[in-house]
């Protein structure tokens, strides 16, 4: 089963909590009747749990766009650049990335979601910008009492909210989860690297910054960094003397290892993919329940059939309140969503009703965009 959100809404500073994005896609809005929450069946649980190691893309460079919000700048990889990387990988199995490649290559005719295959992780959805703005505004209040906050972003995709936390909270430990392994490897990990270990460097002759009145992009020259970390000032002499002026595979691996070791990002960030039910089961099997002080999720409640698996994952992964911490440490979930999803079964109201019916979490709306096409932020905490 596949479907497409095709109701576009332009985003500007006033409608998006003060954020301006270079490329932010929107899910359509409209009036939809509340639907009963469907129970999941075995065939609904598709993608297996996988823990994915951080690695630098096997490309000579990556191209990133700047995303601006509340005066902050983050970098995210261009989809065109992913397409270019895939085109260079002649040995790629055509079946491996079929759903993700379809979403990237079909342009306006592509589906935004292919059920049990692709869950929209290539795009930056509008409500993730609302969540990013909220984190920027309330970062001190949310994390001031934590020495080493632990954060999970569920359905992360481009992971902009977590990118902000990684760049502004040096002690934060962040786990990024998406349904698709390919999204993690092609988008999420490059985005993390572009904001940390491979951040654009205006002093580096390898990086090419391009800016106009309202956009900014950069081609991050990874090969330049690789040669510099291996050969330093002797790069031109060593590479220039070769018949084929390229790094060998062994040299590339060595350089990538060294580049990652220059930063602590491998120790601060973990990546997992797979269905939420499989993720929760893996956590229980490994004794890793209740591991996160804050859980973030955006645009994940558009179908009522997913409510149970999402709720079960949140229940499994959210840390329990410490009896000695008082009000200083309150583990919570922040959910960013459209008030109504046109043509789909999910909505803020139906999700709130479902959460209350389970009796495990308290849930409240802490921000609303206003207007006829509303967006909201919900906060979930353990019931007393």
Image (cartoon, grey):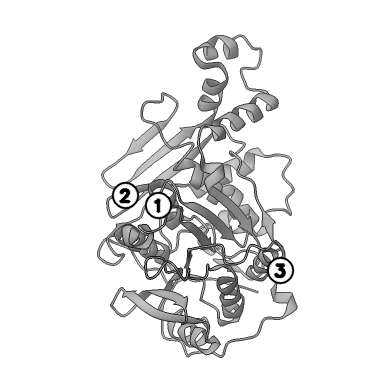
Q: Quote the CA–CA distance across marks 1 and 2.
A: 8 Å
In front here: 59 or 105? 59
- Place of residue 59 in the rendered image (x, y in percent of width and height, measured from the top left): 59, 35
Q: Residue 353 carries which label?
A: none
x, y (%) of residue 218?
41, 37
The residue that label 2 is drawn on is 72
Q: Name the residue under label 3.
A: 46
Name which of mark 1 and mark 3 comes first in the sequence: 3
Mark 3 lies on a secondary structure that is loop
Residue at mark 3 to residue at mark 2: CA–CA distance: 37 Å
Q: Quadrant of residue 117?
A: bottom right
Going from N to C along the chain, the mark reached first, 1 or 2, is 2
Secondary structure found at label 2: strand
C-beta proximity under 8 Å, tags 1 and 2: yes
Q: Where is residue 129 in the image (x, y as percent from the top left)?
A: 38, 61
Above or below, 258 relative to 56: above
Mark 2 neighbour class, 10 Å CA radius: few under 14, some 14 to 19, many 20 or more? few
Left or right for 82, reference 333: right
Q: Nearer the viewer, residue 63 or 251?
A: 251
Q: Residue 164 carries which label?
A: 1
Point 41% across, 25% down: residue? 204
- At label 1, counting other C-alpha atoms closer than 10 Å, the crowd grade (few under 14, some 14-19, many 20 or more) is many
Of helix, strand and loop, which one carries label 1? helix
The residue positioned 56% from the left and 31% from the top of the image is 60
């Amino acid at each position: 089963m596949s479907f497409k959100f095709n109701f576009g809404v332009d985003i500007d500073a006033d409608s998006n909590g003060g954020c301006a994005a270079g490329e932010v896609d929107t899910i359509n809005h409209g009036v939809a009747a509340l639907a009963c929450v469907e129970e999941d069946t075995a065939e609904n649980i598709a993608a297996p749990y996988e823990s994915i190691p951080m690695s630098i893309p096997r490309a000579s460079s990556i191209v990133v766009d700047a995303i601006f919000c509340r005066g902050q700048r983050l970098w995210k990889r261009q989809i065109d650049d992913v397409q270019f990387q895939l085109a260079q990988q002649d040995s790629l199995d055509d079946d491996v990335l079929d759903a993700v490649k379809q979403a990237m290559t079909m342009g306006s005719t592509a589906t935004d979601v292919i059920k049990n295959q692709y869950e929209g992780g290539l795009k930056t959805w509008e409500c993730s910008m609302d969540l990013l703005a909220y984190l920027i505004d309330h970062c001190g209040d949310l994390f001031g009492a934590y020495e080493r906050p632990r954060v999970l972003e569920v359905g992360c995709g481009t992971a902009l909210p977590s990118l902000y936390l990684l760049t502004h909270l040096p002690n934060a430990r962040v786990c990024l989860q998406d349904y698709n392994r390919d999204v993690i490897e092609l988008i999420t990990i490059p985005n993390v690297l572009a904001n940390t270990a491979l951040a654009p460097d205006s002093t580096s002759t390898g990086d090419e910054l391009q800016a106009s009145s309202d956009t900014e992009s950069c081609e991050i020259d990874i090969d330049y960094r690789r040669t510099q970390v291996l050969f330093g000032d002797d790069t031109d002499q060593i590479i220039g003397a070769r018949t084929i002026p390229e790094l060998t595979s062994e040299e590339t691996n060595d350089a990538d290892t060294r580049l990652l070791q220059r930063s602590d990002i491998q120790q601060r960030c973990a990546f997992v993919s797979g269905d939420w039910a499989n993720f929760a089961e893996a956590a229980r099997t490994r004794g890793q329940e209740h591991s996160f002080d804050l859980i973030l999720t955006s645009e994940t409640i558009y179908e009522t059939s997913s409510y149970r698996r999402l709720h079960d994952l949140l229940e499994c992964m959210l840390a329990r309140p410490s009896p000695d911490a008082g009000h200083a440490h309150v583990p919570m979930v922040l959910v960013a969503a459209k008030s109504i999803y046109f043509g789909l079964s999910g909505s803020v109201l139906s999700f709130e009703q479902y959460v209350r019916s389970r009796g495990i979490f308290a849930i409240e709306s802490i921000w609303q965009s206003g207007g006829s096409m509303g967006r909201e932020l919900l906060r979930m905490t353990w019931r007393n």
